[in-house]
Image: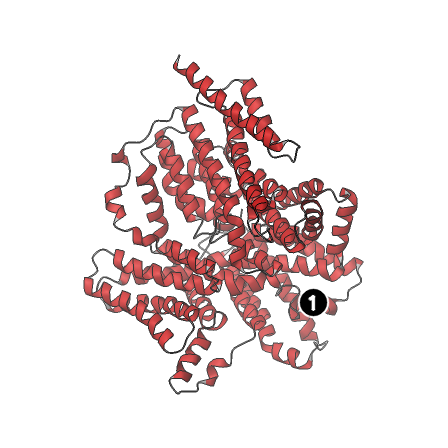
Amino acid sequence: MTEALVIERGRIGLISKVILTIGVLVTSYEIAVVMGLNFALYTIARNLGAELRFLLDVPDIQQSMALVLGLVMAVAFLIYPARRSTPPARIPVYDYALASTAFLSMFYLALVYPSVVRTGYVEATVANVLIPTVAIVLLLEAARRTLGVALPAIAAAILFLGYVFKGFNIRHLVNHMYFAREGIFSTPLFVMVSYVFAFVFFGSVLEKIGVGEYITKFVMSLVGHKWGGPAKTAVVASALMGTISGSSVANVLTTGTFTIPLMKKAGYPPEIAGAVEPAASTGGQLMPPIMGAAAFVMAQFLGRPYRDIIIAAALPAILYFTSIYVFVDRLTKKLDVKPLSRKELPSFRDLVGGMYMLSPIPLITYLLLAGLEPQYSALGSIGAAVASAWIYQRGVPKLTKALAVASVVLVAVAGFLLGLPVSTAIFMSGAGALAIAVVLGALLRGGRKLAKAVVDSFDTTIRSTTTIFLAASCAGLIQGTLTLTGWATEIGYRLVDISGGNLFILMLTAMSISLVLGMGVPTTANYIITSTIVGVPMARAIHQITGIDMEASKLVAHMFVFYFGIIADLTPPVALASYAGSLLAKSDFWKTALNATKLAIAGYLVPYIFTLNPTILILTASTWTLESAYSLLYGLASSALSLLLLSAGVVGWHASPLGVTQRVLFVVLGLMLLLPISLRELTTISAAATYVALYIYNRRRAVA
């Protein structure tokens, strides 16, 4: 099991301080160098008359990737044991040695990289072959400990096959995978270091200052007393949590801690309570503005701003969560689960006064849609989160609160007045807010709780980034081998030949690859591998059939692959999100996973919907006409009706319990609306009329 489900060490004692120190170092380096705080400080100093040119002497991005990855690998060897049977409290000496060697093997690249750039090639010395080889081996071992066997085994097998069958010598291989920007340090790791880290840090800060807990309690106070309240709380809270958390398992473990016990208390069977939360939480990676890490990789692969990805993903995500909400509503009525009393729920009056705690969510959405750099949007929103946390703190003197909030605002205003662009001034306010929280928290009465929360977020961030950085690095090895050998193109052409260019067969192929890889490969690596193989031929087929341009076709194809990479987290036999839900619900894993799959049926169908009707992604229309607007509205209406019909058929409830005949009818009608058949409008109207007529009939029969 991956992510939060693996055994971790280093939570107490000296080693916990070492991990925290590495977290502080990596976060500080990311903010100061990778995100460009050094350039902001240089600009301010120059405008004040000081020429601090040393601030411009920073490592190249590949050197930065090597340094960060080296520290991440060191953390992996310290917190993940070689075997699960190893006692978590004891860290063997060899793990310290491996951690040190892993860091040094990556530090070597940072050291020699300037000479490689200067000469234009890598000398064939023993060190230049041996050290990269050691680095690759240790990367695979760190990934095995962190992510399980599947991904590193695939990477090792593809590397070996490339070495054997393509006749590459070891020097050629390590040059491509280590020194060049084609293997370990290719696009996936570049995206992780440049953009994703900032969002992981954003999520960690919000979690530690209590935003995640506030979201769950606030939603619970709003809908918890209604029919299916606890389950609907899980759906709505997971949708909101999905805006700040890019991990389905983390989402389950955050919101599920509150919602799953409440669902069981309300009367839901454990296998249902444990299924609702994973189904909703998996959608967190599909819900803008902060989607799964693969969404940032997609933006880089497509050469589009991240803003385009979140715009394209908006309507499909709404369809997904609407479907789950309807499923839960029907299931609640079928099971006759009574609402909870208000006394058992958090008080709305107590919570409504703190709604400003949610301010980072609309702020980061606005900043991203306004075109601000992703990392600047994340840091700026951290500034708003920290300011909100100061106000929300209980027992802190009002003067301290005012001083802290004013300081955050002052940093942004001063930066702008001293010549920084608005985007950089916003970024500065976030960086300043973190420093202010730590310094004022340590010096002023009542601020230590917030200071501790900020410091703890450094620890959470480095632990969280370990999994996604190692997954991206292994995926880079696979991608690098596929491109170096030409296998990616060969496999793509072979798929076109086998399918005859049939889009439906290509969609089934992409879905199958994603779901199979999802049995052991994290979502980001899953997306990278599948899109590398299937992305181009699928985009060509979409272009030929729908008539949209190639750039739009690529967006549709990559979004299709992205969806199934995420849904693989929910699909048995592995189903990590469902496994987390079953642990919290203390339910049977298989029953929980199968129920979660039923509840999340939209996740399996929505990719087919927007592939056959690309206007649902909005950005696929080159120009908006009455025809394209009608196509969008009709697509949404027919898709929503299809999901309503399917929910009635699958759950077996439509105003009253359904017999076999009606259930089959609803499922058939729901699937028909998804197919590109003739007379589609007539079919939709007929299906809608049938849906309404049977609702009236069933309701009257139930009353009688």
Residue farthest to the top? 704
Most extreme residue toward the front is: 626
Q: Quadrant of residue 442?
A: bottom left
Number of residue marks: 1
Colour scheme of the rendered structure: secondary structure
In the rendering, at what x and y percent does residue 543 appear?
69, 49
Quarter holding the C terminus is top left
Q: Is residue 570 above or below residue 162?
A: above
Of the pair 543 and 74, the residue shown nearer to us: 543
Observer-nearest of 102 and 514: 514
Determine if residue 225 is in view.
Answer: yes
Q: Is residue 571 visible?
A: no
- In the displayed structure, would residue 59 be above or below residue 98? below
Vertically, is 529 above or below 95?
above
For the residue marked with disc 1, what is the amino acid?
His
Q: Quadrant of residue 516?
A: top right
- For the residue labelled by badge 1, is the local secondary structure a helix, a strand or a loop? helix
Compared across the picture, whether 458 is left or right of 300 comes to left
Q: Residues within 10 Å of mark 1 (few under 14, many from 20)?
A: some
Q: Which residue is mark 1?
A: 176
Q: Position of residue 10 (x, y in %)?
A: 44, 58
In the image, 67 versus 431, the foreground residue is 431
Q: Position of residue 221 (x, y in %)?
A: 30, 40
* Residue at the image position 46 percent from the left and 77 percent from the top: 39
- Residue positioned 44% across, 51% down in the render: 243
Q: Which residue is depicted at the point 54% across and 22% down? A: 663
Residue 445 percent location from the top left of the image: 21, 64
Q: Is residue 192 left or right of residue 238?
A: right
Q: Is 136 or 96 nearer to us in this picture?
A: 136
